[in-house]
Amino acid sequence: MPAPRFLGDKFCSTARAKRERRKEARPGELLEAALDLFVDKGFAATRAEEVAARAGVSKGTLFLYFPSKEELFKAVVVENLSGRFTEWNKEFEEFEGSTSDMLRYCMRIWWERVGSTKASGLTKLMLSEGRNFPELAEFYREEVVRPGHTLMRRIVQRGIDSGEFAPVDVGHAIYAIIAPMLFLMLWKHSAVICVDADSDLDPEKYLATQAETVLHGLSMPPKAGV
């Protein structure tokens, strides 16, 4: 006995809704698969069909969303790194504590949201392969490096303007903040060869120590006789 028409319509509607939900989720699944492969294998060694297979779709489907491997990589960078700067700049504007506390917060949150995640491997990838892919290197500089440096300069300048920090060369001072972050990304994604095999490096303690070291160097020296 054939099923009543209304049951058939309901089944078709449910199946259609599932397909639509799957279609909406597909770009995110492709970006997640691409991030895993780019970080694990590098840009040059990752093939588009591998990304598609890991996401459970065909290579043709991948190219419907991202017309080339280069465009896929750019989308991964935006999704995991450069897309966060709106949020981070908003936090800068709304932060009410001292600049010293802001810097400590910045380094701690960076580790929680980026450094400890797979996304930090994108920086290591660009350090090792950027020279071979100048267009991607420039994209990364424009989307990640320049906004990141701008935010760091704003933090240091805030401390100078408030009288907390000495009037240092801001453009060079920011690298004292960035260097510990770069070290941890290399440590995390380079088989831990950046430290002695017997070392027990705690990333959070390391960043907290580096933050205090940087702040000691930036702090305005006490006035004579005070």
Image (tube, rainbow, N blue to C red):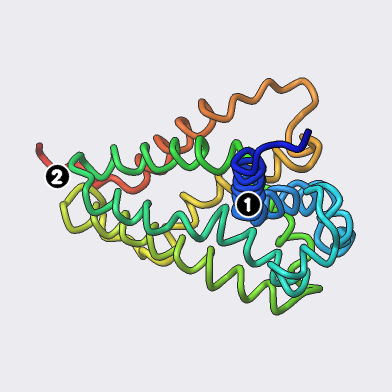
On the rendered image, what quadrant is the C terminus found in? top left
Using the image as rendered, state which of residue 47 and residue 140 is in the foreground.
47
Callout count = 2
| Horizontal and vertical percent position of residue 155 | 31, 54
**Residue occupying image coordinates x 72% and y 78%:** 134
**Residue occupying image coordinates x 36% and y 63%:** 170
**Residue occupying image coordinates x 88% and y 54%:** 50
Using the image as rendered, state which of residue 155 and residue 134 is in the foreground.
134
Q: Secondary structure at mark 2?
A: loop
Q: Which residue is mark 1?
A: 28
Using the image as rendered, state which of residue 205 and residue 96 is in the foreground.
96
Quadrant housing residue 125? bottom right
| Horizontal and vertical percent position of residue 161 | 18, 58
On the rendered image, what quadrant is the N terminus found in? top right
- 32 sits left or right of 202 in the view: right
Q: Earlier in the sequence, mark 2 or mark 1?
A: 1
Using the image as rendered, state which of residue 42 and residue 49 is in the foreground.
49
Point out which mark residue 223 bears.
Answer: 2
| Horizontal and vertical percent position of residue 79 | 56, 56
Image depth: mark 2 or mark 1 in front: 1
Measure the C-alpha gap from mark 2 to mark 1: 55 Å
Q: Amino acid at mark 1?
A: Gly
Q: Can residue 183 be seen by looking at this rendering?
A: no
Q: Can residue 132 be seen by looking at this rendering?
A: yes
Q: Secondary structure at mark 1?
A: helix
Q: Amino acid at mark 2?
A: Lys
Point out which mark residue 152 bears.
Answer: none
